[in-house]
Amino acid sequence: FSENDMARRSVDAVIKLSEKFKKDKGRLPVLMEVCGSHTMAFAKTGIKQRLSEHVKLIAGPGCPVCVTDQKSIDAMIQLSEIPDTIICTFGDMMRVPGSKYSLMKAKTEGKDIRVVYSPLESVKIAQNNPDKEVVFLGIGFETTIPVLALAVRDAENLELSNYTIWMTTKLVEPVLRSLLDSGEVMVDGLLLPGHVSVVLGKKSYDFLMNEYKVPSVITGFEPVQLLTGIYKSVDLLLHQKAEVINDYPHVVKNEGNLVARRLLEKYFKLNDEAWRGMSKIPNSGLVFKDRYARFDAKKKFNVHVKEPRKTKCRCGEIIKGSINPEECVLFNKGCTPTHPIGPCMVSTEGTCAAHYQYMREE
Ligand code: SF4
């Protein structure tokens, strides 16, 4: 079979199975895709649109740019105003609006803000600019954090005293616990992120099965993989089995990536972390261990950022899966990819951006 044939057959199989669910329960099965890349892939491939009358797919808190709180962006802008300071960040963060303006705007006003593809590049920048302070905006989940650890290791080996990271990283388990505990969103099953699971391993999701009894499937990013993930989730629901299935076994192992996990343990410790639109979630982020505090930008610089004022942007609810982008009054009105009001419209993994590009009604 060709890839397209496989996808068509998979769609038919999902529809058939979800019809059974509908007959049993009188409603659609509700699955949350935890990963921002899954959100984009579902919209881009048309799977979400094709299955809309059979399976309710809701986006979860897995877009790293979207969950970064506005205070971190404001802090970076404040830091960029200190003479002889270079701010380094991933490209997607540049256009996220802060309280005053975005990092992009700050750059056009002459601040030294540089886009890097890897935190390791920011270490090189620090090495090449010994008379300047270099601060990297450290966002991301367990997939990215090991690279931050490698950057610190490089900075340590190079004995750099002008390199720090503004840690605002996020961990998957605490946010899933927080969402499931809150009961704000009704979810029957979870589609778990392929990339993060490479580091975490299947075993780290046992709590979903043992404590929350939520069927979950670790899945890849190709159309057939996505559809198989949905099929297996609905199948678990029909059989009332709260298992975790690893449907991405060639890359996700039971124990995860031990080298990456050891790196995290070496440099970082747990921290209560602020997520956009949510209050602080206990132990949901990482900060430097005391031994490495010299690399902590929050400790090195005296930055005080005010609480951001409230706007009409509803990214906080989008991230929790409690509303669709179309329910935000600004969607495709005040807020578009060229004039984004919130990060969910900026990020290449943002739910609003996915809806705007692939699901918007003209
Ligand atoms: Fe925020 Fe724009 Fe999405 Fe509304 S459409 S929630 S303003 S990003």
Image (tube, rainbow, N blue to C red):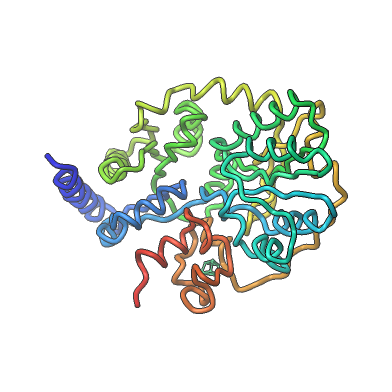
Residue 247 x, y percent position in the rendering = 33, 33
Residue 17 x, y percent position in the rendering = 21, 47
Residue 96 x, y percent position in the rendering = 61, 61
Question: In the picture shown, does residue 45 fall above or below 272?
Answer: below
Q: On the picture, is 359 further left or further right than 314?
A: left
Q: Residue furthest left?
A: 1
Q: On the picture, is 213 further left or further right than 152?
A: left
Residue at screen point 51% across, 64% down: 345
- Quarter of the rendering occupied by the N terminus: top left
Which quarter of the picture shows residue 56?
bottom left
Residue at screen point 84% across, 41% down: 131
Q: On the picture, is 105 further left or further right than 60?
A: right
Residue 63 x, y percent position in the rendering = 52, 50
- Quarter of the rendering occupied by the C terminus: bottom left
Residue at screen point 36% across, 51% down: 41
Q: Nearer the viewer, residue 51 or 258?
A: 258
Question: In the picture shown, does residue 289 fall above or below 320?
Answer: above
Q: Residue furthest front?
A: 128
Question: In the picture shown, does residue 96 fall above or below 114?
Answer: below
Q: Nearer the viewer, residue 161 or 68?
A: 161
Which quarter of the picture shows residue 98?
bottom right
Question: In the picture shown, does residue 313 fall above or below 262?
Answer: below
